[in-house]
Image (spheres, rainbow, N blue to C red):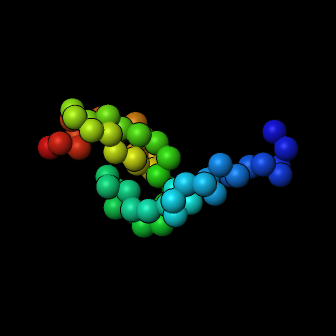
Amino acid sequence: MAKNFRGKPLRSVPARARGNCPVCNRTGIKLLHEIKLSDKTIKVCKNCRHTSPEKLQA
């Protein structure tokens, strides 16, 4: 992949896909990964992407 196009899809996402991670409460971090809870999906950061849903509901 050419370096010219890295990150270009993030320009179309609101706030450049940045926000506060609901799991670790970091601010200004990219929220690109989804975790499926029982009835909804939430976007989390790269470090929290492997967090099990059981830990989130407890």
In the picture shown, does residue 26 fall above or below 57?
below
Q: Is residue 19 left or right of residue 58?
A: right
Q: Quadrant of residue 24?
A: bottom left
Seen from this angle, which residue lies furthest left? Answer: 58
Q: Is residue 15 left or right of residue 10?
A: left
Q: Nearer the viewer, residue 13 or 17?
A: 13
Seen from this angle, which residue lies furthest front? Answer: 12
Going 83% across and 52% down the picture, which residue do you hit? 4
Going 51% across and 59% down the picture, which residue do you hit? 14
Give how far across and how far down residue 40 sits, in percent: 27, 38
Going 44% across and 62% down the picture, which residue do you hit? 19
Q: Quadrant of the C terminus?
A: top left
In the picture shown, does residue 38 fall above or below 6?
above
Q: Quadrant of the N terminus?
A: top right
Q: Quadrant of residue 25?
A: bottom left
Q: Is residue 32 left or right of residue 24?
A: right
Figure label count: 0
Going 65% across and 49% down the picture, which residue do you hit? 9
Q: Quadrant of residue 54?
A: top left
Give how far across and how far down residue 56 sits, in percent: 23, 44
Give how far across and how far down residue 6 sits, in percent: 74, 49
